[in-house]
Amino acid sequence: MDTLFSLRVFREVIRCGSFTRAADKLGISTAMASKHVSHLEKQVCAKLLQRNSRSLHLTEAGEQYHRCCVQALETLDTAAERAAGGADTPQGRLKITMPMWFANPVFSGWLAEYRRRHPQVSLDLILDNRKADLIAEGIDLALRVSTDDLPPSLIVRPLSDIRFYLAAAPDYLAAHGTPATPQQAARLDFVLPSYVDMDSVRITRGGDSFTLAPAAPVRADNTLMVRQMVLAGCGIGYLPEWTVRRDFESGRLVRILSDWHILTATLYAAYADRAFLSAKVRSFIDFLCEKTGAAAQTAKAA
């Protein structure tokens, strides 16, 4: 039995979470997919998968083996691409994980533009705030605004700063007044994220500073939900510029304390340390640097 193909079957079974779905994608029978995994288990003399009629999951040995398997196959695939002369042409599936609030008109517009530039690259997007194992899950690139949950084995590259603004709905401000100072803003209700500590945020203007520590009767574990609650008139929120740019332009939201610097986060790209970076990953990182750089200049001018 072809061990290299068995490795590909094993990777696809874990990726799909099912022997049947993996077999369909690879064009083989479910029974044959099972035989390929059994072949690997016999070779390593260890159980790689625990399976029953309803689910399957990796054993401890299987987790280690799968991690090495994915890394080895990606190295072979990239080497084959280089040997075929395609190393400089972005192509293939690009699997990216990113925070959930990246589901916004600005970023989705960038993704559409990237696809127009590189039609041979297909995008597999995972919107999730959880910590992901890039190698084990076959993820090419992680976009994060924090490096706290990233293992030291990854290459982490800062791309750009993302500015956060204070925003509120016009109806909320009509009912409670538009704050002209941080002290006035601190007396109003805020909608805060629950997945990060923003109970106390220091804002600045020139040589002045003020620590905002407002009441937050509404919290959410999703930035998109924070935005929706702000739109609904529940209070003021700290929101990334990408998510509220069009809200400000349309008047759905109003920027509060626009002469104060509220908060800046750094966008990072993280990827596995490999001997060489594939053209698709390299092209996407370069594209993001271009778009985020232009966006940062626009934000500074605003």
Image: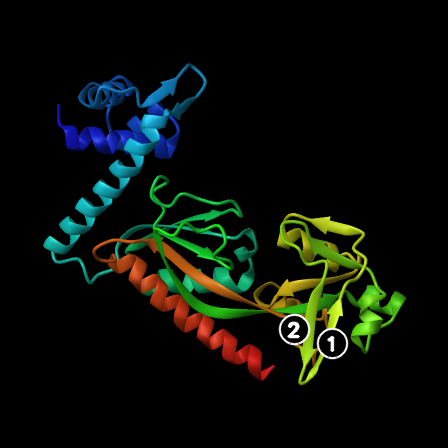
Q: Quadrant of residue 40?
A: top left
**Residue at the extreme top:** 53
Q: Position of residue 177 (x, y in %)?
A: 87, 71
Neighbour tally class for label 2: few under 14, some 14-19, many 20 plus, Cα within 10 Å? few
**Residue at the extreme right:** 175
Numbered disc 1: secondary structure: loop
As drawn, the label of residue 19 is none
Q: Position of residue 37 (x, y in %)?
A: 25, 23
Q: In front: 49, or 83? A: 49
Q: Is residue 22 left or right of residue 1?
A: right
Q: Position of residue 81 (x, y in %)?
A: 16, 52
For disc 1, the marked residue is: 257
Q: In front: 98, or 262? A: 262
For disc 2, the marked residue is: 249
The residue that appears at 36% across and 35% down in the rendered structure is: 15
Which quadrant holds the N terminus? top left
Q: Is residue 6 left or right of residue 297?
A: left
The residue that appears at 25% across and 36% down in the rendered structure is: 69
Q: Is residue 293 left or right of residue 48?
A: right
Q: CA distance from mark 2 to mark 1?
A: 16 Å
Q: Quadrant of residue 33?
A: top left
Q: In front: 190, or 46? A: 46
Which quadrant holds the C terminus? bottom right
Q: Relative to 48, is 266 above or below?
A: below
Numbered disc 2: secondary structure: helix
Residue type at the position of mark 2 = Glu
